[in-house]
Amino acid sequence: MVALRDPDHGCPWDREQDFQSITPYTIEEAYEVADAIARGDMDDLRDELGDLLFQVVFHAHMGSERGAFDFDDVANTISDKLERRHPHVFGDEEIGSAEQQSRAWEAHKKAERAAREGSRAPSVLDAVHSGRPALQRATELQRAAASQGFDWHDAASVLPKLREELVELETAMAQPGGHQQAVEELGDLLFTCVNLARHLNVDADETLRRANTKFEKRFRRMESRVQRQGGSLEDATLTEMDALWESGKRAGSE
């Protein structure tokens, strides 16, 4: 990293980067790690973890250039945090279950936030960072609210809210000039879908990733069938494509 960022002999692209410009790559590498795990590809996971580690090194080096922090500071900070939040491992506190550990973890986080924020009115939502991907942040906001008892009892009880949000979206779409309201209602609908995923004990992001994969397989299969017949999707009608799509679904070869 030192060589890549060298002002005289480094890589022009690497020298031009800053925290903001590198952030999308950092997020992309984290998703590629998750994808390798989902596919069970250990060789690819090894490579993707290396790419993600490089992002950490990149940010740490830019921090060092500013005199703000370096890689050792990053490693020491997380080490100190893990020791502080695991007194039952690194100290004398006793915790007998994963549930107790989760409660203790949140208590430690709350104390740390209070120390950082001083007189600011504390909120259980303070720990949910605004920079997280939208699906992940929605899940964490909901979990934080649920920790205070603001939650549905189970997955089935979310369904009426889901139907309510869908009706509100349909109503907004039917109104002249209701585009902005429809956008807001669509956001509410997506947020409720995340709530349903949480109550089904599934990760909303991973669930959507699987849906993406399924869609891609079906679309490619439909595309291949048309091409084998000497045509293209551009020339096919929507009715023809729908028939091919349903045929692929019935084949059950996902």
Image: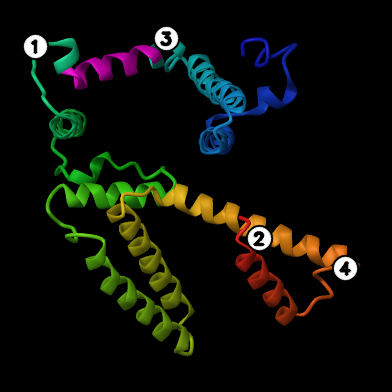
Marks 4 and 1: in contact by CB < 8 Å?
no
Q: Is residue 123 left or right of residue 40?
A: left
**Cα–Cα span, label 1 and label 3:** 27 Å
Q: Which residues are magenta?
A: 75-87
Describe the element under mark 2 as helix, strand or loop.
helix
Secondary structure mostly seen in magenta is helix
Mark 2 residue crowding within 10 angstroms, few (<14) / some (14–19) / many (20+): many
Mark 1 residue crowding within 10 angstroms, few (<14) / some (14–19) / many (20+): few
Q: Earlier in the sequence, mark 2 or mark 3?
A: 3
Q: Earlier in the sequence, mark 2 or mark 1?
A: 1
The amino acid type found where label 2 is placed reads Arg
The amino acid type found where label 4 is placed reads Gln
- Examine the image and state in which quarter residue 249 appears: bottom right
Foreground label between 3 and 4: 4
- Pointer 2: what residue? 218
Q: Quadrant of the C terminus?
A: bottom right
The residue under the point 18% across, 14% down is 89
